[in-house]
Image: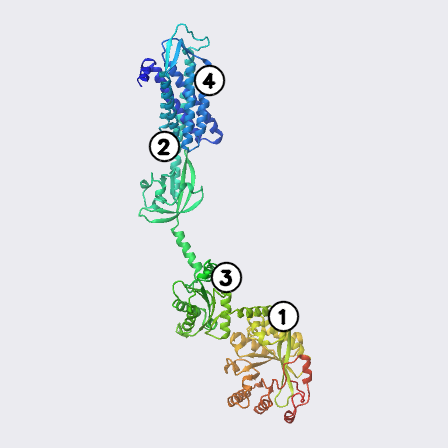
Amino acid sequence: MNQILTCLQQDHDPWLLSAAGFVCLIGVYASFSLAQHAGRSEESSRQRWGFLAILSAGCTAWATHMIALLAFQPGMASGFDPLLTALSLVFVVAGIGVGIGLAIGTRDRRLRFFAGLVLGLSITLLHYVGQAGYRVAGTVSWDVGLAGGTVLASLVMNGIAMVVAGERNRSLRRFGAPMLFAAIAVLHLGGMTAIQLTFDPRIRLPDYTMAPNVIAPIVAGVCLGLMALAFLGLRFTLNARAQTRRDQARLRELANLAIEGLAICDGAVITAVNDSLQKLSGRTRDDLIGQDLGTLLPTTALQELGLREEGDAELIGANGQLVPVRVLRSEVTVGSAKQTVVAIRDQRERLKMEATFRRLAYTDTLTGLTNRLRFNELLARKANHPQRSQNPFALLALDLDRFKWINDTLGHSVGDLVLQQVAVRLEELVQPGDTIARLGGDEFMLLLPEEKDRARDIAERAVLSLRQPYAVQGLTIEIGVSVGIAYSQTDGDTGDELTSNADLALYRAKQSGRNRICKFEPQMLLDALARRTLEMDLRLALQRDEFVVHYQPQIDASTGAFQGAEALVRWQHPTKGLVSPADFIPLAEELGLIGTIGQKVLAVACREALSWPSEFTVAVNLSAHQLTEIDLVQKVAAVLSATGLPSSRLELEVTESALLQDTDRTHANLHGIHELGVRVSLDDFGTGYSSLSHLTQFPFDKLKIDQSFVRRLPGDNNSVAIVQAVVGLADKLKMTVTMEGVEREEQRAFAKREGCQGIQGYLVSRPIASHELGELFDPHRVSDHEWNRTTPVEAGLKR
């Protein structure tokens, strides 16, 4: 250390040495300023400013070295080798270019330290190549230890300077330039102190040596250029700082307009926040600025969040409460620096709304029970569970009995109130872990963990509970429930199979009567398959015109004379033969095909009756569906017009149960038909929903006594009394009476004795085809004597 101080005090011109230090400071500042400006510039001009920064740094090191050599006073003649002096400048510019090129744009400290070593080696090469080009009239010797130590120290200082210059922290970056200046100073002073010169009059300077007064103007020109660059760099720096302030102010203004909370970060350190983030976090701006973002978002790794990719996180408020948020990271340029902007959106309202939507999506709005969508998800999850065999369950399908009657007669508002009470009663039967769902209408499902006999027990309790009366709007309502049960271990592999099989069991329960419970059996699948096959065949039968009409004759009870016939539909199946109406009429009604079939029967019957003698009538049944058709009267009139059958020869039969479907429409249709001249008969009188008011409300011409009464005649006194009453009532109301189901002679004789105008039944004939009716068109009358001594066939009647 004493050697260096001695060298500084005795061997150097203090003014020139000070000038060298000043030039070094100015040049280092200019180089750093130009390098920062290059980083801020667009791609097109970045390379030019980068090259100028490298050239400035190289010239700074060279000029500092040359001024220091000029300040050196060896005490003998001295000069400079022009080639080595020029090469030293080339070496240092190239080396600095490589070092800066390695350091630019990297955050890796090890790479920046290596770049600093490259930079230090280039300056070392400059110094010692420059010293090799310094000629004196004497000999030169070196203190290798001192030279090597200062070179090593300078290299380490250059590496540290480059590491510090690339840090994000602005306070640390400020030490980069002074550290680089110190490294150059240590290298030069150590090298100049390590050299020892001895005057030798025998040694002369080479002729090509440049004298100090020749090299000095060149160095001065370089120094002036460095000063100009330093001034330019100062201007760039001031402009950049002003622009940074403007950008920050504009960014703060824009941030405060945002609804989301915004945090502007340098790295992970918060440098600015907007008002929304202060409100969201419950902290002041001073509390937030300077804090690590992790103190707000502890579960979020900022660098792992992709640019402009949203992610879920939790924000810690001032009170320690966790707030669910969505975060979005992006980068903006503020001045010359890239800054991270984190948008933080409060998710509490959204999550609350989503929970509401989820509840609405998964809940039946009328009863508050689980709805079909949610139930199907739960059932599928249980059915597909890997440990399903260890967690068996039962599925109960429930359907209310007589609920449609409530909606049709009392209104849907009353029906809704009943459904709500049903839901309450069902909830009283179950335990936590059970699921009750309303699938729609009056359909409910129960999903129960299967325990020994528990599903059956719940079903029985449901039947008992739901059949109890309901008090609704001052009314007392009674309904029932049918239940179908399917078990996961035996009755299906998937949720759909289990649901289907539980529905099949429910269907069988409803067929068996009200308030019944039925467990699924495999035979139900076969029955369902047969039913589906029958459905498809029935639809095809309409397309293929497989329906035929047979006729059951109606005769005078006294004379046996033919009066007409009742048209009865039959299905001529291509493989099953003649199918009974009892097997397909209920299905046709359920499928909505009965209206089409009825219209076809009406047309065929009218067309075929036209070939009968003009005094004979044809009777056709009208279904409940047809009675409620808006254009029924027009359809009947169209058939009569198309076939040419006189309306007086057509008789349409209706049952009392059919009258209840839509009383107003039925009333209008029957009166309209009667106005066409068509006779109207009340079929199966005395059964079902018999009401004497129907006889005055509707325009009936005939009453047909049901065979259930006829079957017990004449031995049953009650049946006798009922038939006598009906005949007397019809006589008073100017109606005729036909007795159905007459199979024995004593029944015919009773009908004649009591004044019935007509009979039909197996005593007369079974239903037969139209071409067979001709045998019954016998013009003579059959007397009582003939009835008694001949069979119906012998009397011209065919069974």
- Image x and y of residue 747, in percent: 58, 89
Badge 2 element: helix
Which one is in front, 126 or 175?
A: 126
Instruction: Answer with mark 2 or mark 4, whichever residue precedes in sequence.
Output: 4
Q: Closer to the observer: label 3 or label 4?
A: 3
User: Dot 4, how many residues are within 10 Å of its Cα: few (below 14), some (14-19), or many (20+)?
Assistant: some
Q: Closer to the observer: label 1 or label 3?
A: 3
Kindly identify which numbered label has been placed on residue 170: 2
Which one is in front, 351 or 693?
A: 351
Instruction: Answer with mark 1 or mark 4, whichever residue precedes in sequence.
Output: 4
Q: Report, in whole angstroms, how far the alpha carbon at label 3 lies from the one at label 2.
A: 66 Å
Q: Report, in whole angstroms, how far the alpha carbon at label 3 lies from the one at label 4.
A: 87 Å
The reply, left or right, for residue 650 in relation to residue 187 is right
Can you say whether 57 is above or below 772 in the image? above
The residue pinned by badge 4 equals 87
Query: Which quarter of the image is occupied by the C terminus?
Result: bottom right
Badge 1 element: helix
Which one is in front, 154 or 364?
A: 154
Q: Report, in whole angstroms, how far the alpha carbon at label 2 lies from the one at label 4.
A: 36 Å
The residue pinned by badge 1 equals 541
- Image x and y of residue 424, in percent: 39, 67
The reply, left or right, for residue 378 in relation to residue 762 is left
The amino acid sitting under disc 2 is: Arg
Can you say whether 39 is above or below 312 in the image? above
The amino acid sitting under disc 1 is: Ala
Q: Quadrant of residue 355?
A: bottom left
The answer to the question of whether label 1 and label 3 lie on touching residues, with beta carbons closer than 8 A, is no
